[in-house]
Image (cartoon, coloured by chain):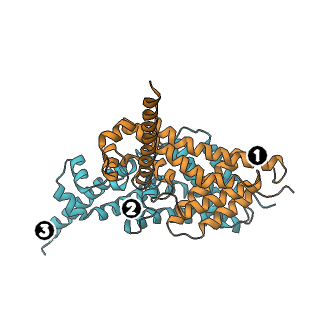
Chain colours: A cyan, B orange
Amino acid sequence: MSSAEQGTSDRRLLRGARSRRAILRHAVDVASLEGLDGLSLGRLAGDLKISKSGVQTLFGTKENLQVATAECARGVFADAVVRPALSAPEGAARLRALVESWLAYATTPLFPGGCFWAANQAAFDGRPGRVHDALFDGQRSWRGLLADELRHAVEAAEIAELDVDLAAFQLDAVLLAANTALRCGDEDAAAKARRVAEGLLEPPR
Amino acid sequence: MSSAEQGTSDRRLLRGARSRRAILRHAVDVASLEGLDGLSLGRLAGDLKISKSGVQTLFGTKENLQVATAECARGVFADAVVRPALSAPEGAARLRALVESWLAYATTPLFPGGCFWAANQAAFDGRPGRVHDALFDGQRSWRGLLADELRHAVEAAEIAELDVDLAAFQLDAVLLAANTALRCGDEDAAAKARRVAEGLLEPPR
């Protein structure tokens, strides 16, 4: 391949990657409103006024598109919710930063239909497969992050000894419930979630 | 109206009520799998091999059908999950019975798509209206029941003083998360939910 041909091919790849990202970002919005089942290659092509064959070339199947959409949502969430909290020192401070960042996400969601996972997990929890795995890997890694920070806090004796996996399960559950409650207009839900978090973060006696 | 006419009319009403119940019970199953948005008068008529005009006469609009379906799900849940626990004495014992009854429901759901509320709340949490209200009234009354039993337990000094509304919020959140986790094959989730419940039910010191 000549260097000119290489250049053309690189530009094509780059253009392909850019379209892929733009399509996926829209797919995430659609799936937050109507669920991953509401996605189709034709629907996206229509919404974005591009050819269906172009979308087909990029994703192949509906299942590939759904998996890529779930992964894209995870990336958007990581950038907007997780990354800012990582500047706080690890342990209790970072856990508080993650809780605040999450409550801000629940109050002013990144996605028009609200929390992407809340909108999609129930539909896929009983349907094993790649879409299920992509959806629940995201939650597992979020819960793992909460557990890691709880562990750091225990090791640094910032908080009392506790079962970090149980506490992470509990905190994740309460944050998800707060999301639903906030979307139903229950303004107290954020305060409730904070109080549960502070209960878990009690200093050792 | 003659008494013969009255008899015919009563029989018609009764037949109407029976069909209504049969249609709704099927509608609950469909909505647990595909969401309340997946319901339509035509779809139900086709599934049950009855005339669409008959279904139309009974429900009128899709919204009426969705509201009636949510209310039917609530009735099925009350009969199968709540009522058996009410034979336990009020307070801590009844709360434990409710938790066990709920975990049995999460493990072997009444509905083919799993928890009816988990499957539908995310789609309606941001959409005010009668369907939203029917869905969330069910959750509010369930959470209210948990709070009542916690209050009885505190008043009888079976458990330590706590904020009953916060504890009910927390318990409801953990039970819902356990449902999702169990459906994903996380067998520990029931044990986690029980440990959170026992944490809330600690006796006074």
Which structural element holds mark 2? helix
Between residues A57 and B27, which one lies in front from this camera angle?
B27
Q: Are marks 3 and 2 in contact (CB under 8 Å)?
A: no
Q: Nearer the viewer, mark 1 or mark 2?
A: 1
Residue type at mark 2? Glu
Between residues B136 and A87, which one lies in front from this camera angle?
B136
Give the spatial CA distance, label 1 vs label 2. Answer: 44 Å
Q: What x and y, as percent, mark residue A123?
A: 42, 57
Of callouts 3 and 2, which one flags the residue occurring earlier in the amino acid sequence?
3
Residue type at mark 1? Arg
The C terminus of chain B, quarter of image = bottom right
Host chain of mark 3: A
- On screen, residue A175 above or below A5: above
Q: Please state if B171 lies on the left or on the right of B180 as rendered.
A: right
Q: Please state if A2 lies on the left or on the right of A170 as rendered.
A: left
Host chain of mark 1: B
Q: What x and y, as percent, mark residue A172?
A: 58, 57
Host chain of mark 2: A
Residue with the mark numbered 2: A71
Which residue reaches farthest top?
B1
Residue B153: tell me if it is visible: yes
Residue B103's disc is: none
Residue at the location (30% across, 44% down)? B51
Crowding near pointer 3: few (<14 within 10 Å), some, many (20+)? Answer: few
Give the spatial CA distance, label 3 vs label 2. Answer: 34 Å
Q: Are marks 1 and 2 in contact (CB under 8 Å)?
A: no
Residue with the mark numbered 3: A4
Marks counted in the figure total: 3
